[in-house]
Amino acid sequence: MHIGSGVANGAVTVPVAVYLLSVWLLHVRPHRRGARYDAGFPVAVGVILAATTAPWPFALPLTAAATTALVVACYVFLR
């Protein structure tokens, strides 16, 4: 018995999205570092959750790309 691609995508993307949302709510948002910095986390979470609907081989690379873009954006906006 095999799981479907939607379940497999969700097993990767949902925990990453929950983690990033938790980091944003507990660590980033209380410090109020600016709108551009704060907006990156919810945008990345939305992109990652949208990657759940992508065909199976593309969900993990899209999740990695969104997370990498978030790290780069945080680095650039903190300077």
Image (tube, rainbow, N blue to C red):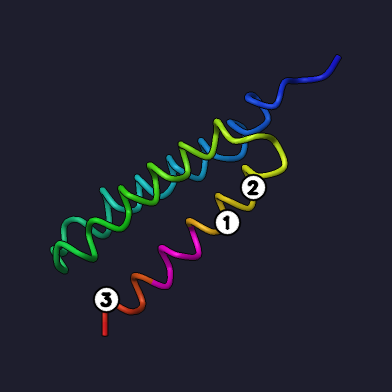
Residue type, label 2: Leu
Measuring 38% from the left and 42% from the top, which residue is drawn there?
46
Residue type, label 3: Phe
Is label 3 in a helix, a strand or a loop?
helix
The spot of residue 7 in percent (x, y) is 64, 24
Measuring 61% from the left and 39% from the top, which residue is drawn there?
12
Image quadrant in which you'd find residue 18: top left
Real-space Cα separation, disc 3 to disc 2, in angstroms? 26 Å
The spot of residue 8 in percent (x, y) is 68, 30
Residue, disc 1: 64
The spot of residue 78 in percent (x, y) is 26, 79
Using the image as rendered, state which of residue 51 and residue 34 is in the foreground. Answer: 51
Image quadrant in which you'd find residue 58: top right
Residue, disc 3: 77
**Residue 5 shown left or right of residue 71 in the figure:** right
Measuring 57% from the left and 50% from the top, which residue is drawn there?
62
In the picture, the disc for residue 15 is: none
**Residue 33 shown left or right of residue 55 in the figure:** left
The magenta span reads 67-72
Q: Dividing the image into 4 quarters, which one contains the N terminus? A: top right
